[in-house]
Amino acid sequence: MFIKTAFAVAILALTGATQAQVAPTRTILVPAPMRVMLGLQAVAGGDDLVTAERTNGKTDTIKAGDGVTFAAGVDYRVNPAFSLQASLGYQTARVNANNGKLEFTRIPVELLAFYHFNESWRLGGGVRFVNKPTLKGSGVASMPDVEFDNATSGVIEAEYLMGRNWGVQLRYVHEQLKLDGYRGDINADQAGLGVRYYF
């Protein structure tokens, strides 16, 4: 009886030691350092560019900072604290009617750097190169295209990352446009919200 008990105790001790040595493993998913992203932003602000009067007497105004931007680019995580982002976009603000249309477009290229407070929040800023800002009309609003000079602007942005794929942004852009024959700058400052999907 003593021998069987001692043998059982030895087996239990050996099993406990084995369990102590073999720790459960965890799989940690590390995001890829470089990811492709698609973005959609809605912003507003700046000086009035053009006002359209409808047949019912109502008016619609396009401001220099207005627009919806569709963008694509890449996001690179340099290290846990910093990341870089480059994007190419198309920004458009328009007034549509049955007999005509007014539209202000531009092609922004943005280079941004972010500091990550944690895995959910990051704050950043950078430079924005605005190409071919153009005001044009069609139909009863037909007019020669008004082409503004290309511009360089500053961007500041806060982003909340929801898991691995989605991000929501609050942004402000300081932008000034110039036009030949027009004295002074045209204020195209803009603020708004955006959403991005990271692949």
Image (spheres, helix red, strand yellow):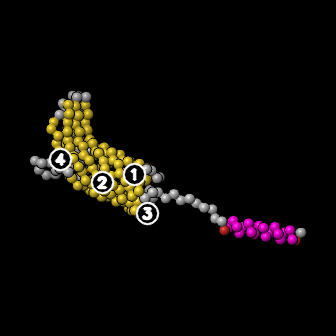
Q: Is residue 180 left or right of residue 18?
A: left
Q: Secondary structure at mark 4?
A: loop
Q: Which residue is mark 1?
A: 36
Q: Which labelled disc corresponds to residue 110?
A: 2
Q: How far apart are labels 1 and 2 at the CA level?
A: 15 Å
Q: How far apart are labels 3 and 4 at the CA level?
A: 40 Å
**Cβ atoms under marks 1 and 2 closer than 8 Å:** no
Residues in magenta? Answer: 3-20
x 77%, y 67%: residue = 12
Whether residue 192 is in magenta: the answer is no
State the image coordinates of residue 60 (x, y, percent, origin top left).
Answer: 23, 36
Q: Which labelled disc corresponds to residue 148?
A: 4
Residues packed near mark 2 inside 10 Å, few (<14), some (14 to 19) or many (20 plus): many
Magenta region, main secondary structure = helix
Q: Secondary structure at mark 3?
A: loop
The amino acid type, in three-letter code, at marker 1 is Val
State the image coordinates of residue 9 (x, y, percent, origin top left).
Answer: 80, 69
Q: How far apart are labels 4 and 1 at the CA level?
A: 31 Å
Q: Earlier in the sequence, mark 2 or mark 4?
A: 2
Nearer the viewer's eye, disc 3 or disc 1?
1
